[in-house]
Image (tube, rainbow, N blue to C red):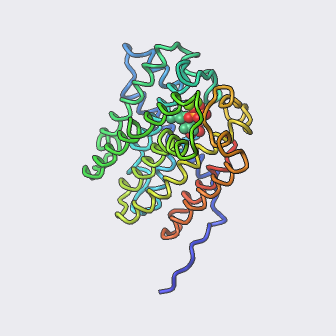
Amino acid sequence: LIMIPKRFDTMFDLNSYLASKQKQINLYLDNLLKKYSDSALGSRIHDAMKYTLAGNGKRMRPILCIAAAEAVKGGNTQDVILAACAIEMIHTYSLIHDDLPAMDNDNIRRGKPTCHIAFDEATAILTGDALLTFAFQTLSLNKAETGKTVDSDRLLKVINRIAFAAGNGGMVEGQMMDVSSENRNLTINELEKMHSLKTGALISASVYSGAVLGGGTDGQIEALEIFAKNIGLAFQVKDDILNIEGEPEIMGKAAGTDIIRNKNTYPLVVGLKESKKIAQNLVNSALKTLDCFDSGADPLRHIAGYIIERKK
Ligand code: IPE
Ligand code: IPE
Ligand code: MG
Ligand code: MG
């Protein structure tokens, strides 16, 4: 058997891939909200959930979830769409809380006023709570919504992993490190840990969920875990870089805020040039772990590059 080296499919059109997945995810998010959260009682929260979920979000995590399912074959969008949406809800909640005055105190997100500006602080806190819990409600809807029975052992693994990644095993712990280190300089190792927790953990959970629900083998899941660890960290390093070099108009959020708030970032600790090198190296390592996959992993390959080339 001759092994043909895996090459990038140069015909692959990442932009239309992203656009079509975004459309699908947005449609599901919309329908889920309509069907399960719209009540006369909770209409203000409902409006705020809808408001923050909409906007120019890239849907990177749900797309990674879908792309991971595609990479392990057997898996398709339908198998993972609810997990993908659940993760986007958790991510959106994290942005609402991240922007609060007690945290980063930001006024613009996804191209419009942040939730606490458009509504008020109490509503923003509660909307975050609502999105976080709605995510787990969504995860439990598998059969009702897709008409498919997902293997319950696999689903349980995914729920456990998403909860861990969102909580103090991941994002919440990273966010705690972030806000509590504003007045001291972290070492590069501490910074790597903080970024891996606050941003990497949920990205890893996205890829993991796609791979597991898509029916991946243990070997495939293991390889994708390493891939995700690398792009997850690269994603936050790039976020740090964009906070210096990015265009607020394009990003839909402010730039220059990390320095003002004494945030620990890669550019602060190792410089801008080295940060870019580190991000590139992380993506290279990620790509290497995909060598054992066929063209089903092409979306993941292209997304890895996009993570450090993106302008928003
Ligand atoms: C921003 O996430 C916050 C980070 C964890 C870096 P995204 O860059 O994915 O934001 P949206 O979802 O596209 O708005
Ligand atoms: C956000 O990190 C991390 C989470 C929301 C979990 P940042 O605070 O650096 O992200 P932006 O720049 O506000 O999007
Ligand atoms: Mg923050
Ligand atoms: Mg922030």
Q: Residue at x 64, y 26 (%)?
A: 261
In the image, taking residue 246 as reference, residue 234 lies left or right, namely left
Q: Nearer the viewer, residue 310 or 193?
A: 193
Residue occupying the far bottom of the picture? 1
- In the drawing, does residue 126 fall left or right of residue 309? left
The correct choice, above or below, for 104 with respect to 225 in the image is: above
Spot occupied by residue 63 in the image (x, y as percentages of width and height): 51, 48
The quadrant of the rendering that contains the C terminus is top right
Tell me the residue at 55%/42% (across/down): 191
Q: Is residue 138 or residue 256 the one in the foreground? A: 256
Q: Which corner quadrant of the image does residue 237 belong to?
A: top right
Q: Is residue 134 above or below residue 242?
A: above
Total marks placed: 0
Residue 172 screen position, x and y as percent: 43, 33
Q: Residue at x 47, y 58 (%)?
A: 226
> Is 165 on the left or on the right of 56, as rendered?
left
The structure residue drawn at horizontal position 59% and vertical position 27%, both measured from the top left corner, is: 183
**Above or below 255: residue 285:** below
The percent position of residue 59, horizontal first and vertical second, equals 54, 41
Residue 203 in view here: yes
Q: Identify the image quadrant of residue 221.
A: bottom left
Relative to 245, residue 55 above or below: above
Residue 274 x %, y %? 69, 51
Residue lying at the far left of the rendered structure: 153
| Residue 24 shows up from this direction | no
Ligand 1 quadrant in view:
top right
